[in-house]
Image: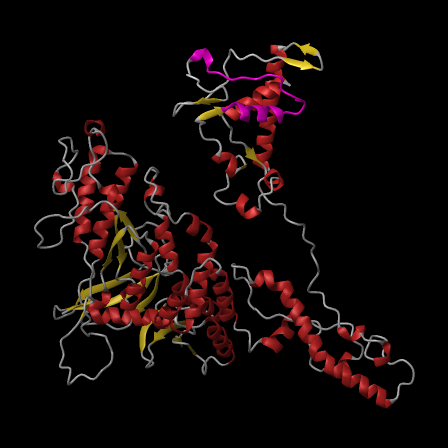
Amino acid sequence: MHAKVLKAINNYLSPEVHFYSLKQMLDKGYPTDVIFDGPLLENGFIDTEELRKSQLRKEVRLSDIISEIMKVDGVKEIHEISIAGCDQVIKQTNDWLICIENGKKPELCDLSSFSYSKGSLPLNINDKKVQEYLITLKKEEDVLRDDAKKNKELALPQGTSYDIGNYATILNEFPDTYGVGITGIIGDRTPEREALAKQMKAYLLFFDQILAGYFKHLEKVKEVLSINGSLKRTYFTQTLKNIKGFDELVSGYDKNDEDKLTDSLYEELDNSVERRNEVLDHLISRFAETFSDYTFLMKSLYGKSTDEIVLNNKETFLKEYTSLSKDRGLGYNYTLNADTDVWNTTNISGAQKRIARLLGIKNYTQRNLSQSPVSIIKTANTGGKPTYTWKIKDAAGSIILSSVNTFQIEYAANKNLNEAIYQTIQIDQEDLEHTWEKFEEDPNKYNLIGNIQIRFSAGGNYYFDILDDAGNVMATHKKTNPYANRQDLKAGIFNIVNYFKYEFTEEGIFLVEHLLLKPVLKNYKSMGGIGCMSIGKTFKVMYDLEVTGASFMSSCEEDCETDVFDPYSYRVSVVLPGFAYRFQDPDFRRYAETVIRQEIPAHVLAKICWVGDRMSEVQTAQSDLSEFETAFRKYLTDKSRNDLPNLGSSIQNLLAALTNLNNIYRPGRLLDCAMDDNDDLDGKIILGQSNI
């Protein structure tokens, strides 16, 4: 009893915050939305009201102590009680109240005395037993705390698995008098009764098949709503069984092959790619995300295969959504110093990953984007003038497409390259498969698959060319190393088309946090903290800088006299390869810039730089990008390894490389408006997006 009284008084003087299990919180009367409000704690749930009362007491009231003691089980009455400050440290003017100084916690004085009686018999207090009981009470609290750790989730009701796809015909549910069940007509089988029974069966079979398909859909709904995309069809049905005289009513019905039956009923309706896109749109909308603007924009870049490629983008986005959502605020982890954590790595900021997936960038690893699978080859002709051709390599380094013409200017070669990429990507997978079936039937008549022209060599081998919309050959594949048979040719065509749709990329994204580019100090303690910026007279430049003032970032634009902004705080630089196929499109650039600014926190200012543009009649800026990549990689390596002797020069080189990066705009030409009635924007002057 004394142990419980001591515990009650101590809990009043210094209230504890207890952890509770879910059941205990429900028993307290809290609804689940209140219980789960806020982050899920490791040790259980906290009673908000109890937490509010756990503040340091400013006064101790005798009436409250009496109330707490009387709550102890076994206490019948209190004969006499008084409170006072221990050793008269606290001046007391009221026998019922003791005031406590701010910032101090009241405790039970060691000089406190207690006496107990049972009836008229006085009881002695065994101090050793009291301590043992206090330890026991503490262990009981520990057990409850451990229980609170384990019981933090609502018990879900156990589901029952039903064979929901197993459908039984409704014909057998009718009374026998109708003659449509498994027993047939009972009694006199007159022609009139047989005709009426058949008529009713035929009428009900239509609804029977609809219900059978409906229940098959229910069975497959978990696969339809899956993000893995393994289904080749999105409509389902099943054969009707246990129907007497079924063959007399229906002909050409595939009883033994449900796939054939499904195709015969739904093949013209089941556009699996379109339906899968609708399903994934539904799943994505549950997270308040959307791909509608992105899909609309891709139509001009991917043609008829847009839905296939966007579907792949959505599937990838949903598969990674756990990390894309919870890690969206994470930055680059520069404490990891292994080579695989610095370059050719997914160790990038959460914002980069989200931006990449929202823009459909296939590979967001931090790598050398200047090392492109596309090569523009410059050679000199007999007259000494340069000519240009191009080639594209696959992941293994083998040439898969190359130009068939030579061009006098680089712009024309690049335009031909983009057209060849478009004509290869825009071949729809379904059209590809159907046209190949026709090619197998008559190779001479059906040798054009989309914009792919299949050709035969004199030795009986196969190769293929890429044609433009006018039917002119613009690129070729394996002309010098043709395919020996049709199976290899089919695999080659399908692999090339799929490579351009799902693997080929020059795209990527770099994000440089300016705050990490602040110069290094030899000794932080000498200045009482971290800070080394010189902005007007706001900060003092310390004498112990590791590098010279040239390593400071400048917020000054061209021709300005003084720096007036802080170039480090809340600022990032986003670098993208502007020469990539999609990144050359001005509309896509505007969309990408919008996405970048939406995904980066509102208080952070992003400087977006598109490096290079093959369509701009200007030498591509891959060399500038390569210089930046080299400097950025060296900086990240020195930063992760805390290599102070070299970090200063790395920062300086990176700042120089960042300064050399420039947005490349499409050229525009001043024309006579009265003479030019073409609505095409190509070559026109667009304010802020063109150079004259």
Residue 42 visible from this viewpoint: no
Task: Pick the quarter of the image with the N terminus.
Answer: top right
Residue drawn 47% across and 64% down?
281
Q: Would residue 63 be counted in the magenta stretch? A: yes
Q: Residue furthest bottom?
A: 192
Q: Residue furthest right?
A: 187
Is 69 drawn above or below residue 121 in the view shown? below
Which colour style is shown? secondary structure
Q: Is residue 190 left or right of residue 217?
A: right
- Picture coordinates of residue 586 (x, y %)? 27, 67
Residue 464 visible from this viewpoint: yes
Q: Would residue 673 be counted in the magenta stretch? A: no
Is 576 drawn above or below residue 83 in the view shown? below
- Picture coordinates of residue 216 (x, y %)? 65, 67
In this rendered view, identify the residue nearer to me: 629 or 210.
210
Q: Is residue 405 left or right of residue 671?
A: right
Q: Is residue 533 left or right of residue 441?
A: left
In this rendered view, identify the residue nearer to me: 106 or 340.
106
- Picture coordinates of residue 250 (x, y %)? 72, 82
Q: Which residues are magenta?
A: 61-88
Residue drawn 85% across and 79% down?
184
Q: Is residue 596 left or right of residue 185?
A: left
Quarter holding residue 147: top right
Quarter holding residue 596: bottom left
Count of numbered badges drawn on the protein = 0
Task: Pick the quarter of the image with the C terminus.
Answer: bottom left
Is 186 drawn above or below residue 565 in the view shown? below
